Image (spheres, rainbow, N blue to C red):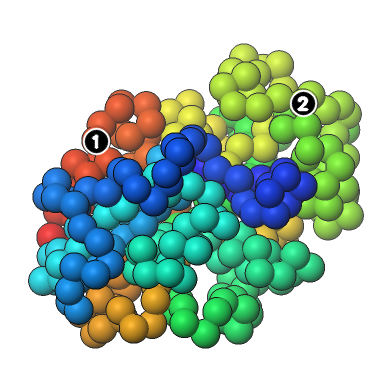
Amino acid sequence: MPHRFTRVAVAVATLGLLAACGSSGSDPLGSGSTSSSGSTGSASAGGGSIVVGSADFSESQLLAEIYAGALTAKGVNATTKLNIGAREIYLKALQDGSIDVVPEYTGALAYFYDNSFSETDPDKVYSALEGLIPAQFQLLAKSAAEDNDSINVTKETADKYKLSSIADLASVAGDLTLGAPPEFQTRPQGIPGLAKDYGVTFKSFRPLKGQQLVQALKNGQVDAANIFSTDPAIAENGFVTLTDDKRLFGSQNVVPLIVKVKDTPEVTAALDGVSKVLTTATLSDLLKKVDVDKADPATVAKEFHTQAGLA
């Protein structure tokens, strides 16, 4: 998965871009190009064609398939070019015409163009981002879906301490252990931010990642955990995500980023239609089918189109 501020810190330190899972291969723009019907395509396939790109992690690939299917349903000749690579690579592909649209995340993209970016309100982030992207690009409507940092507890812990928001932790965190990736301990949006914005200070911290972190929360080795909001493990284990009412973790709404010359009324209607119905819970459920159940992303996308009335 992409990012967000935890992943931004790592990427900026290494490549000056946002890191993502997976490998783009030796020629990131030369493979993985398939349409929802299995054909291949390029940006020069015709004036009415759209090539939907993706980064090299499963959520981005799934979103690209969802976008392509929605476009096809509106009569647009849409193909996909998946697994391109990290943000720096696929944005170059967008600029040079190798692709025409790509799923993005508002806060992370804003940070890419301005590493001092600190706005957190969803609408203000979107408005600011419109002024940061290159003139040849355009944002379409953002969705309610976010893939963001989140603090999670088990249902038992939520019931025991009557927790529904991060703010509710203030009076009990002194007895609890937090698990999170190592960088969460020092970054401004991590432990320091919890203390500053919410007055939340945990008794102890355990640096953990991935499945180790999920298992630690599940087994009671930590009482709260920093897990990305679309991670299927949240729903799979019945974890309770505490609301971030003060937007400590910013806004990371999923949004289509498109080359202006490729944006037509049909394209806008198709992609805005996706954004209108896509929520974090829905995206998490779809991602579970891909990452846990090992279903084909294109198949999962088609099922979503049918259920959401986009087909």
The crowding category of the residue bearing disc 1, from other C-alpha atoms within 10 Å (few below 14, some 14 to 19, many at least 20), is few
Decide if residue 223 is on the left or right side of residue 109: right
For badge 2, the amino acid type reads Pro
Does dot 1 land on a helix, a strand or a loop?
A: loop
Task: Indicate which disc residue 263 carries.
Answer: none
| Residue pictured at 59% horizontal, 27% vertical | 210
Q: Position of residue 66 (x, y in %)?
A: 27, 55
Q: Is residue 194 visible?
A: no
Q: Which residue is mark 2?
A: 207
Tell me which residue sits at (44%, 37%) in the image. Answer: 25
On screen, residue 221 above or below 236:
above
Q: Nearer the viewer, mark 1 or mark 2?
A: 1
Q: Amino acid at mark 1?
A: Asp
Could one spot residue 239 in this view of the protein?
yes
Choose the circle earlier in sequence order: 1 or 2.
Answer: 2
Where's residue 137, x and y in %? 46, 78
Q: Position of residue 117 (x, y in %)?
A: 74, 69
